[in-house]
Image: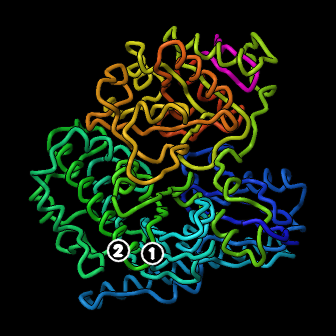
Amino acid sequence: MSGTPSSTVVLGLNAFTPNSSASLFVQGQYIGSAEEERFAGPKRAAVWPTESIQFLLAKGGVNSHDVTDVALNFSPDAYSRPVHDDSFAASVVEQRDLAFSAARGRLDDRLSHAELLFPTARVVGIPHHRAHAAYAFAASGFEDAAVLILDSVGEVTASSIWDSNHGVLGKEATWSGPDYSSVGYFYGAITTHLGWKANDEEGTVMALAALGDPVPYRSLVNQLIQLRDDELWIDPTLLPTRVRRVRSGFTDEFISQSCPPRAASDPIDASHRNLAAAAQERLEDIVTQLAELALRLTGKRQLVFSGGVAENCVANGKLADMPMIDAFYVPPAPGDAGTSLGAALALRLTPLDATALEISNPLVGASMDATALNRFFVRTASALEVGEAAAQLVEWCDEGLIVGLVRGRFEFGPRALGNRSIIASPVVEGVTERLNRMVKHREPFRPFAPVVRLESVESIFELPHATVDLSSMSLALPVKKGLDRLGSVTHDNGLARVQTVTRSRNPVLWEALRIMDERDGLGVLINTSLNVKGQPICGTPALLEEFAAESAVQHFLIDETIYIYRQG
């Protein structure tokens, strides 16, 4: 991906849709990416990413008048070509046409807003799935690969397959599926039905699935979504035809054969667990079939997977173990946040002075100004060397303490990967229960992720058939037998969403794990995001103060400084 730098300043945007974000290239150099929620909230903010833009422009040493190109992550032209199934009633076609026209109007407003803020820039809209594919493929570092994109919806597309050769992504999708036959829509509908938020809490359904039995609802859910003759199909007698933003829920026919909709405050029973299990099983089946289709259509043995559905780490683990895949990759920000970066990449007209390693690096947000923390954060030590900070982290974890770890620039993507993390010991009794009840305030059945050194991963987890990158916590893998001490990070299905770290990218965390490896023969820690349920990962002192006040975390390691939170 290296070459003569571009003489442009390119700003990529995901605006007014969930996980709003911005990405910036200056003279071909990748400056960074940031999600708006990390600056002020709320979680999954769907706004104009003002703070992200301001941060990136300052980081790049440019201003709004220097920006030559602005790329948004949707194309207005695509909304003019909605696809309708021949079976749709005239009233459904009319509703869909009106919805697509309104969607185009909203995007035209966003483009006009960008033109107003960046008067000297060219402003364009990039097809949504092309933005997904451009980012994912560039980050993979592969020369040749099939690229599979699955999400809730783009403009008129919800699934697509892209071919790539000699480091270049194809200009058009090799195959695509319409918005009304969407894997993301199917799984989101299940999420809503079970009492959680679609396009947000699908991971909770994935976790619940491990506690259920798919058999009672397998036939029903298999009927709900199918791949017929290489085309996705959702049964409208069970789930009404999608009309853009409208989510009408399942039909009476589906409910009569499964369970009534669950309210968020309702207890979870066997029917909910079993429906989650059947939905997860079907998701894995459909995604596997689509991966096989992608490999067949492109003739490739390397697969790149992105879009919101690619946040399902259990399905990712299954894909990576397919014998026909030699290498498998999911980018750190597979959801819509990543499309700001993908839009900028898709727009480039000349080679970038940036490598795949830089594009794939998720640690590209803003740094934390700890001097702005309030008086309740008491500094007890500073200017620690890496070894000293790591030793303190190990000591705290051995004592059963839950630690806030803040290092450098915050992450791009949904996972905390060591720069805005909560760290704890997986072997100290009661830690996970305290994490769920007192810190994260979330469902007790949701597992926590283990973090290990790259050098140790093979001795602890069963690696898949394909070569994979485990640095972004994107795959759930089987824990090797005999490691009973890792029960707190091993879910009921025997899987763990593992993250690997290297000395160069995560020096303190890597060193802490090395100390534990040499001492105990098991260098594993819990790594979960620095937030409570429903709040964004802490990107600013204000958000960190709010987190500390709402959680039971008192011990913080912020860059090279130790802080103890003492309120009152």
Say whether residue 558 is magenta: yes
Q: Please give the name of the residue rendered at 13% of the width and 55% of the height, measured from the top-left corner.
A: 217
Give the alpha-carbon distance from disc 1 to disc 2, as whole Å: 9 Å
Magenta region: 554-568
Please indicate whether residue 291 sits to the left or right of residue 67 in the image: left
Could you say where residue 203 lies in the image, as x and y percent from the top left?
38, 46
Q: Amino acid at mark 2?
A: Leu
Q: Please give the name of the residue rendered at 66% of the width and 62% of the height, measured from the top-left corner.
A: 341
Near mark 2 (Cα within 10 A), the count class, few <14, some 14-19 or many ≥20, is some
Q: Identify whether 518 is placed above or below 208.
A: above
Q: Amino acid at mark 1?
A: Ile
Q: Which residue is mark 1?
A: 161
Q: Identify whether 330 is placed above or below 490.
A: below
Could you say where residue 68 lies in the image, as x and y percent from the top left?
84, 73
Instruction: Tell me which corner region of the image, top left, top right, bottom left or bottom right, holds residue 70.
Output: bottom right
Q: Identify whether 111 is placed above or below 33.
A: below
Q: Helix, strand, or loop for circle 1?
A: strand
Could you say where residue 20 lies in the image, as x and y percent from the top left?
61, 57
What number is the disc on residue 293? Answer: 2
Q: Please give the name of the residue rendered at 22% of the width and 35% of the height, measured from the top-left corner.
A: 267
